[in-house]
Image (cartoon, grey):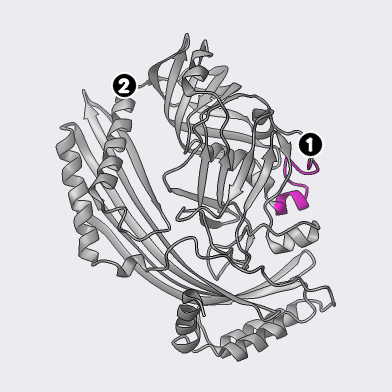
Amino acid sequence: MSEALDIANRLFHEAGGLDPVVAARHLDTALEGADDGELFLEYRESESISLDDGRIRAASFDTRRGFGLRAVLGAASYYAHAGELSDEALARAAATIKAAKAVEQHMTAGGPAASRGALYGGLNPLAEMPFATRAALLQEIDAYTRAADSRVKQVMANISGEWQVVEILRGDGSRVADLRPLVRLNVSVVLEENGRRESGSHGGGGRTTYAPLIEPAYWQSAVQEALRQAKVNLESVAAPAGEMPVVLGAGWPGILLHEAIGHGLEGDFNRKQTSAFAGLMGSRIAAKGITVVDDGTIPDRRGSLTIDDEGTPTSRTTLIEDGILVGFLQDRQNARLMNMRATGNGRRQSYAHAPMPRMTNTIMLGGDSTAEEMIKSVKRGLYAVNFAGGQVDITSGKFVFSASEAYLIEDGKVTAPVKGATLIGNGPDALTKVEMLGSDSVLDPGVGTCGKNGQGVPVGVGQPTMKISGLTVGGTAA
């Protein structure tokens, strides 16, 4: 028996009081006549510690345990959940689902494919070191930041972690489990000079223990990057407005790819014909040279999973290949209804939520240009290095993103930093306007959380530096 299944046994069946034989019987009751479904068991420990102005302002710790029971019949999904692990609670859930669905005999989907080895360690980060050690680290970050620059007026730091244990039982008798650590460190600073205040922030993390985050080289580099951004913002001028070429930086700017393109390639939006990409499989939707993948198999990354929340091993799924739409992200239900393969992208926030198609680590692969070549090719434009957030309409593909760090490009050179720049465009249209791709494709440092239908899950993004021939820039310059 694997380590994950052994721990799941102890948490859910021995200590949790849920008889696995009885659980399987209730699952059979709920899935009678259904196409698919599963029993999802979850145990989660999570904590967060926040420092502000030299003091620990907030500290939280939470433990949750519960189950989600789902039956899928055609396009309908019947879901019941409880924060109580008991035969009685599961029996009530199974009876509710059985009463709710019209029982029709359908072909039941097969069980999940055999899982690979774990993509991350199974150690519990919260049990790794005393709480006082993490609190002391935040105090050390505060002192180091203030000593680094006399203009520092405020320091905010947060360290958080969780350990999630999941077990998934299916109607065919298959049973898989996963141990999922997740940690994150974030530092924000405010600098003041000549009466002007500006901020900067940086963070990172992944599916590891706290050990990498508490290394001085790691957190000190996070502090220096936050300070650098704040210093840049102190020198910023009002952003221009109008249509112009835009050069996007490598790494975190891939959040624009995630929002403006990635969501539109999720199976449910395409099955329901609500995506701007619906009906375009096999068509050219992007400039030649653009290849986009969603890869949930990268070890230790924030968006990676050994298995998804339906028990399917994650995969590296090519979505766009040399500009051609070749794939969608699928959970089991939408894959079956679209006569496609499940890609291991069925994800849920917790036992209280039903799974749906979600991204893992969404990445645009690199080309053969350099950032210097792209900048040199622009007479007047914008170089956007970091983003704060944005909004996207999945049906139309229209997006608005605010840049937290951007610079003017004038006569082929990066000049003044600008403040208040927003990028406005249409995802499918922007893909066709990519003129140059860098060879520097990298992933973000591990800070992404994706929201969809009220559920948040950790994700990763990545891209190379790239030049888009024209986007509308909303600015504040007179």
Q: Secondary structure at mark 1?
A: loop
Looking at the picture, how far across and down is residue 452, in whole percent?
A: 59, 53
Which residue was labeled with disc 1? 283
Badge 1 amino acid: Ser
Q: Does 79 appear above or below 371?
A: below
Q: Main secondary structure of the magenta part?
A: loop
Which residue was labeled with disc 2? 235
Looking at the picture, how far across and down is residue 332, in whole percent?
A: 70, 63
Looking at the picture, how far across and down is residue 160, in whole percent?
A: 35, 58
- Within-10-Å neighbours for mark 1: few <14, some 14–19, many 20+: few
Q: Does 392 appear above or below 16?
A: above
Give the extent of the magenta segment.
Answer: 267-281
Choose the circle earlier in sequence order: 2 or 1: 2
Q: Residue at x 61, y 86 (%)?
A: 23
Q: Secondary structure at mark 2?
A: loop
- Within-10-Å neighbours for mark 2: few <14, some 14–19, many 20+: few
Badge 2 amino acid: Glu
Q: Residue at x 29, y 46 (%)?
A: 218
Q: Residue furthest right?
A: 105
